[in-house]
Image: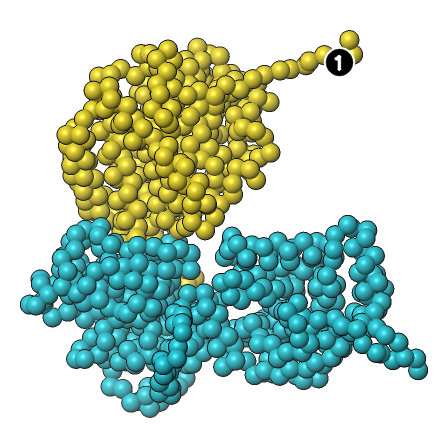
């Protein structure tokens, strides 16, 4: 649990972990204004974590001199939420949060602070720079020149010591800016040159601006980077005339947007499409439905075909760790199922889909979809997929260019099965055809491999005996 | 006759002060002395204040996590009223009222949730076990404590608390079987608050009641309104008397409701119906007792205001006691595992160095 250390002088309040393992929260509403006298335990703001809407109380009594963040901002655990002073008018100059962060870093307990905002915790608060330590780029660009102590494990410190390197001069590329063993080794080889070329007189703490684009502080959490945080282009002004409804772009909607934004900016998408003749499979499907007494869609059969296909083509059942530059191929098929819910797109995970019988897969999908619709689905059922299927056909349409559920490397969109004139062995017949669209991350999956995989899936769907045998 | 009844039983539901304020004079007579009630009310006011403030301490980063007790104050308090100082309270984590009444300093509970293990250092003379977070372990401890007291012929008993979900754990069944088969002086009290975090009791068990889970082990089972201090005190007193008389354990199901989230890491709105919460807010045990006491002339507005004020001051004092405790010394790491510290650990303690890099500490010095 990331326990943050509040400043002893009560000059500012650092956003704590509001649940268990919460790393950030969206500022929904301020309940105080700058200049307000607040009592201990008085609510300062309403914030929404990925778990709950919570009220954040003041840990002590005082006069709030500054609210650090605007409604709608995502605030990192470990960032300053409000500042306190003697009074609104004659408040003491705010203490630099960097100094406090540095102080906090000296206690062994602060190892536990993780990446929870300490990455951006060294933003200087001088001049007109905005003070909220949110992940907004314009603020994060203000870099502290203060010498601070690097984050590193004792083992890495030991290596640095053995090599005679001052670890505080090493640029950390690990989680939350931690200095890793390879950082130390790289520094040992190229350190001096690298450092002088960085045009800095003293070593600085890693800030967001230093982290390569698309390298999340937390690789597993899609919300850690994305839209609104790397505005390289000036924003396009919007003409409000004629607007009939303004919908806040936040909450689940924004999580979805951030995940998609990251995917298209990271993965190199290519899409290959094909159709499978599922005339025979349709007959099997009806047989299965009659035997099990349960109306089965094609989805569980497609899941079976995917499981077979991915075993033959493991390159597509994988996730990319951008931080470590590693491709992780997965043994089991933890299949993401794109579900359209009232709150927006959700992708629950069908675990070990390769082990499921047709009916079990159907039941699993139904259970996950119901859980998404009434929002009762536990968070852990929404993470850990290695390939995703999107059943776009149930809403109409044949082909699509699906966006990969990053860090996965492939996604299959299945269209609606439709009756079509088909030909086989010189004979024309009316059959049932299933359109399929496969998007792959070209960085990981070659075009030929993607096409071969889709072909395997097609072959299985066209031959129910091979598929179900 | 080829078919006869092999076994038949019945489970009673006990209610004395019901949610409409109706008091059963026959059952309720002499259960709790009227002289004691103002002190009980004051205690309840304080416990609820502490509970609400503890929640805020977590939200402002002053506590790691916290499970609120609000709504479930009565069952453990009834136990504390029914037992003697030498008896054991073996609880999970929604029994603050009973633990404090039994003598546990409230600072212990705050320290525990602040992540300071000194919160689990129960002062000598207070017969309570550290609060049990892993679901179900404490029921076995209670059976063991009861067994030990029986062997030592002290006459002391153990009362253990657990939730509805815990009755699905093997630990419950093992503890219940040991206690009943060996006629151990134990009281099993299940706080059925309707939810095992987000799992409703309808999913937890197909049984009509949780009380009946004790039947198969051969112990008497009873159900009571867990939001009724009098009903809980009655069933507790009966069960304690049985245990002390050597007749073995009793299973009590206290039907109650947690009016807050499971813990500070939970948002019950995501799985609980607002209407259900409203229903149970109307059954809140504190206002129920307060209204009855005011009608009887045992409590009034000024007493309540006084209790609120002194409760507030006490809460502030307890928080500052807990927060201002001196940080432990690093060498204390080594103090509580071994009677005789092995040489390698002694070296670590003295040098404050580890061997995690493969070197001997003396090489690093």
Q: Position of residue B50 (x, y in %)?
A: 26, 39
Identity of the residue drawn at 70% across and 54% down:
A360
Q: Position of residue A159 (x, y in %)?
A: 39, 71
Identity of the residue drawn at 36% across and 34% down:
B282
Work out whether residue B268 or residue A326 is closer to the camera in this orientation and state it.
B268
Among the chains pictured, the one given yellow colouring is B
Taking the view exactly as shown, the residue that stands out farthest to the top is B1
Work out whether residue B173 or residue A84 is closer to the camera in this orientation and state it.
A84
Above or below, comparing residue A94 to residue A293 in the picture:
below
Identity of the residue drawn at 36% across and 37% down:
B281
Taking the view exactly as shown, the residue that stands out farthest to the left is A90
Disc 1 is placed on an element classified as: loop
Q: Position of residue B284 (x, y in %)?
A: 35, 33
Side (left or right) of B242 relative to A85: right
Side (left or right) of B331 relative to B153: left
Side (left or right) of A250 relative to A95: right
Label tally: 1
Among the chains pictured, the one given cyan colouring is A
Q: Dot 1: within a 10 Å radius of its alpha carbon, few (fewer than 14), some, or many (20 or more) residues?
A: few
Above or below, comparing residue A100 to residue A205 in the picture:
above
Q: Where is residue A268 in the image (x, y as percent from the top left)?
A: 56, 83
Say whether residue A162 is visible. no
Q: In which quarter of the image is residue A390?
A: bottom right
Task: Indicate the quadrant containing the N terminus of chain B: top left, top right, bottom left or bottom right.
Answer: top right
Task: Indicate the quadrant containing the C terminus of chain B: top left, top right, bottom left or bottom right.
Answer: bottom left
Work out whether residue B79 or residue B156 is closer to the camera in this orientation and state it.
B79
Q: In which quarter of the image is residue A31?
A: bottom left
Q: Mark 1 lies on which chain?
A: B
Q: Mark 1 points at which residue?
A: B3
Side (left or right) of A403 relative to A206: right
Q: Quadrant of residue A250?
A: bottom left
């Amino acid at each position: 649990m990331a326990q943050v250390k509040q400043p002893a002088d009560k000059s500012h309040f650092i956003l704590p972990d509001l649940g268990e393992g919460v790393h950030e929260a969206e500022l929904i509403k301020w309940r105080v204004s700058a200049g307000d006298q607040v009592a201990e335990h008085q609510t300062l703001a309403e914030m929404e974590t990925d778990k709950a809407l919570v009220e954040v109380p003041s840990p002590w009594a005082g006069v709030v001199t500054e609210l650090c963040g605007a409604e709608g901002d995502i605030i990192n655990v470990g960032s300053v939420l409000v500042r306190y002073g003697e009074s609104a008018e004659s408040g003491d100059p705010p203490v630099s949060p960097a100094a406090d962060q540095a102080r906090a870093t000296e206690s062994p307990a602060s190892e536990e602070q993780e990446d929870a905002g300490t990455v951006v915790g060294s933003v200087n608060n001088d001049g007109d720079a905005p003070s909220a330590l949110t992940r907004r780029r314009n603020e994060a660009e203000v870099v502290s020149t203060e010498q601070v102590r690097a984050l590193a494990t004792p083992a890495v410190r030991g290596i640095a010591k053995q090599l005679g390197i001052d670890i505080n001069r090493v640029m950390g590329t690990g989680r939350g800016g931690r200095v890793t063993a390879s950082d130390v080794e790289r520094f040992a080889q190229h350190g001096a040159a690298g450092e002088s070329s960085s045009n800095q007189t003293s070593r600085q703490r890693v800030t967001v601006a230093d982290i390569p684009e698309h390298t999340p502080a937390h690789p597993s959490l899609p919300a850690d980077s994305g839209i609104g945080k790397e505005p390289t282009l000036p924003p396009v002004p919007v003409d409000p005339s004629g607007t009939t409804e303004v919908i806040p772009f936040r909450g689940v909607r924004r999580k979805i947007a951030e995940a998609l934004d990251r995917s298209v900016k990271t993965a190199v998408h290519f899409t290959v499409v094909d159709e499978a003749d599922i005339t025979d499979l349709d007959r099997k499907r009806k047989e299965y439905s009659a035997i099990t007494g349960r109306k089965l869609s094609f989805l569980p059969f497609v899941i079976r075909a995917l499981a077979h296909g991915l075993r033959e083509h493991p390159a597509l059942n994988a996730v990319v760790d951008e931080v470590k530059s590693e491709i992780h191929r997965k043994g089991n098929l933890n299949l993401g199922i794109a579900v359209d819910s009232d709150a927006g797109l959700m992708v629950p995970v069908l675990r070990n889909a390769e082990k499921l019988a047709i009916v079990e897969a159907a039941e699993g999908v139904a259970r996950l979809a119901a859980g998404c619709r009434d929002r009762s689905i536990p968070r852990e059922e929404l993470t850990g997929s290695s390939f995703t299927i999107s059943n776009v056909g149930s809403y109409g349409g044949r082909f699509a260019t699906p966006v990969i559920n990053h860090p996965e490397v492939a996604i299959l969109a299945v269209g609606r099965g439709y009756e079509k004139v088909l030909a086989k062995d010189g004979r024309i017949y009316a059959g049932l055809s299933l359109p399929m669209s496969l998007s792959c991350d070209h960085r990981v999956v070659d075009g030929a491999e993607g096409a071969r995989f889709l072909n395997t899936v097609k072959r299985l769907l066209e031959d129910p005996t091979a598929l179900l045998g | 006759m080829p078919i006869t009844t092999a076994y038949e039983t019945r489970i009673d539901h006990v209610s004395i002060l019901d949610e409409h304020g109706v008091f059963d004079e026959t059952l309720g007579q002499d259960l709790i002395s009227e002289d004691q009630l103002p002190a009980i009310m004051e205690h309840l006011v304080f416990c609820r204040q502490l509970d609400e403030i503890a929640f805020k301490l977590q939200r402002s980063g002053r506590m790691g996590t916290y499970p609120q007790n609000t709504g479930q104050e009565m069952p453990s308090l009834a136990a504390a009223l029914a037992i003697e100082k030498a008896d054991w309270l073996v609880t999970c984590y929604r029994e603050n009222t009973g633990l404090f009444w039994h003598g546990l300093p409230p600072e212990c509970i705050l320290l525990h949730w602040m992540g300071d293990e000194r919160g689990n250092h129960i002062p000598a003379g207070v017969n309570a076990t550290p609060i049990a977070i892993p679901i179900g372990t404490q029921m076995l401890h209670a059976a063991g404590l009861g067994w030990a007291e029986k062997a030592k012929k002290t006459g002391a008993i153990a009362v253990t608390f657990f939730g509805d979900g815990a009755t699905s754990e093997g630990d419950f069944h093992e503890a219940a079987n040991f206690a009943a088969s060996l006629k151990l002086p134990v009281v099993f009290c299940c706080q059925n608050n309707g939810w095992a975090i987000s799992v409703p009791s309808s999913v937890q068990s197909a049984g009509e009641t949780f009380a009946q889970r004790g039947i198969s082990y051969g112990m008497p089972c009873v159900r009571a309104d867990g939001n009724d201090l009098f009903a809980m005190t009655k069933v507790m007193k009966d069960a304690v008397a049985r245990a002390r008389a050597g007749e073995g354990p009793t299973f009590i199901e206290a039907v109650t409701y947690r009016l807050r989230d499971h813990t500070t890491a939970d948002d019950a709105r995501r799985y609980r119906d607002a209407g259900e919460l409203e229903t149970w807010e109307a059954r809140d045990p504190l206002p129920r007792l307060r209204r009855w006491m005011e009608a009887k002339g045992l409590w009034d507005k000024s007493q309540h205001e006084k209790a609120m004020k002194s409760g507030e001051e006490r809460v502030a004092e307890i928080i500052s006691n807990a927060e201002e405790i001196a940080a432990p010394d690093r060498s204390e790491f080594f103090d509580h595992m071994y009677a005789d510290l092995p040489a390698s650990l002694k070296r670590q303690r003295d040098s404050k160095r580890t061997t995690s890099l493969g070197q001997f500490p003396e090489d690093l010095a």
